[in-house]
Amino acid sequence: MRRTLSRTTVALAALGVLVAPAPVVADAPAPVTRHDLLTLADDEVVFPDMHDPIRVVLRSPVFAPRGCEDQGQVVRGRSRISSSVSPDARRRSVWMIDQDVVRFGSRADARALVHRYRHFSKHCVGNVATDDGEGGDVTLKNRAWQPPRVGDESAGMLIGWFQGGSAEWRRVLVVRVGRTVTVLDVDFSDIRPPRSQVLALGRLAVERLD
């Protein structure tokens, strides 16, 4: 699903359900910071063919699956930080790497976010006819992806966005380390993002959270 900071964010924010953060308590975990994010150098190690990438960091919530519905749910946790890396777009190559890091007050809350993605990949496989929010017809191809364990646990999903003869694939890897979850969303034009490279990014993300 195409996103600049953008289509998915705007559409899901409009449709999503806000989840308020839990009240602050004495043993609240330290907030996440830029140091918990992958660096541009990390991304370039995994995708050395990226050309002139631009990186943006902001405090944005995660737009997580809400069952099998064509809408998302906003999840904020106790603290969160996000980054978006956009190289010059080229066919059959990476053109977007988004990362969200969310820290929760409990491991149970962190596991619940991972479960949303696992449920989607297990139970929401198929083609969905939808639109791009501007009247254009779109076919979403939701495909199962159950990645090997990364961190304490992980989940994933694979989504194709087909519109007007063009194709875009997103491979999403969700990794939990303790009470912290990182969501990596890697977008390729025309082809599916390679599993090995997305998993390599996930392992680097775990090193940032250890």
Image: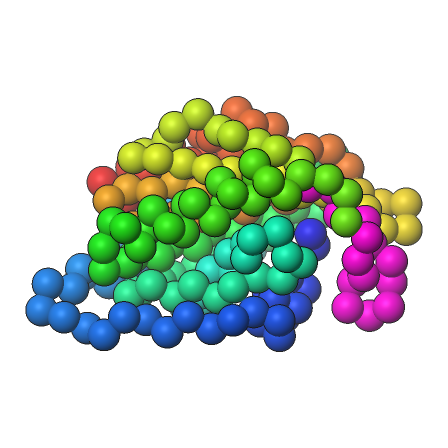
- The x and y percentages for residue 201 are 45, 35
Which image quadrant for residue 8? bottom right
Magenta region, residue range: 129-142
Residue at the spot 24% in from the left edge and 44% down from the top edge: 178
Residue at the spot 73% in from the left edge and 40% down from the top edge: 126
| Label tally | 0
Q: Is any atom of residue 113 visible in this view?
A: yes
Quick check: 40 above or below 144? below
The majority secondary structure of the magenta stretch comes to strand
Q: Is 194 displayed left or right of 17 in the figure?
A: right
Q: Is any atom of residue 58 visible in this view?
A: no
Quick check: 103 above or below 145? below
The residue closer to the viewer here, 92 or 30, is: 30
The residue closer to the viewer here, 108 or 201, is: 108
Residue at the spot 61% in from the left edge and 66% down from the top edge: 12
Identify the colour scheme used: rainbow
